[in-house]
Image: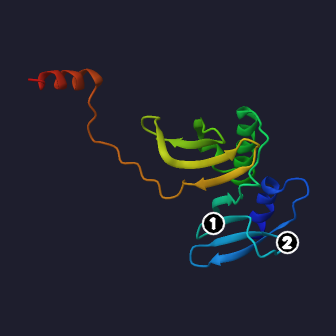
Amino acid sequence: MGKELKKLQLFYKKHDEPILTAKQLIAEANIYDLNPDNANEAVGIVQLTRDGRLKMFGKFFDEEGEPKETMTKANIRLITEKFLHEIFPKAVPKLFLDSAIDLEYFYVFEYVQKDEQFNLPMPNSGICFYMFKNGSIMDMTYHMDGITVLYPKYILTGELAKKTFLDNLN
């Protein structure tokens, strides 16, 4: 957890915030609370995969502590891309930005993989970020493990599908 925590610190720490420590919350699920300088109150949560890779990272905010300042969507996207390069460098070549959604107080950036045969985006096959508009990561979830793509044996052309549909209208 130490190596991952040091990398996450780069994306968590703002100006005068203390160094984070991790306290195991649920051993079987590899879930840790993030605490500033061993304080009792958690400020975030981390979940690791069985082999110790980052699966989920989130920050807790109370209503008074919710970030107010804003950055441009393009600058926030740069933060997500820096996070990907720092934390998941081997995954970066497999991912592309599939969506960037503005939801008033935060953005959702979803990076997904494409299937090899049709080059179509595969939902829930990558890494998703929920980003406050000040550039803080609210939540990051990793979905790249255990993906299996099943391809059909026979594929209809658009023309044949249209003809079949029209033939069966009556």
> Could you say where residue 39 lies in the image, as x and y percent from the top left?
81, 74
Q: The residue under label 2 is which amino acid type?
A: Asp
Disc 1 target residue: 47
Q: CA distance from mark 2 to mark 1?
A: 19 Å
Quadrant (top left/top right/bottom left/bottom right) for the C terminus: top left
Question: Quick one: label 2 or label 1, which is nearer the N terminus?
Answer: 2
Quadrant (top left/top right/bottom left/bottom right) for the N terminus: bottom right
114 on left or right of 76: left
> Could you say where residue 70 lies in the image, as x and y percent from the top left?
77, 38
Mark 2: which secondary structure?
A: loop
Disc 2 target residue: 37
Image-quadrant location for residue 105: top right
Q: State the residue lying farthest toward the front.
A: 64
Specify few, some or many for label 1: CA neighbours under 10 Å numbering under 14, 14-19, or 20 or more.
many
Q: Nearer the viewer, residue 77 or 66?
A: 66
Mark 1: which secondary structure?
A: strand
Q: Please, which colouring scheme is shown?
A: rainbow
Image-quadrant location for residue 152: top left
> Could you say where residue 87 lies in the image, as x and y percent from the top left?
72, 54
Q: Is residue 21 above or below residue 108?
A: below
Q: The residue under label 1 is which amino acid type?
A: Gln
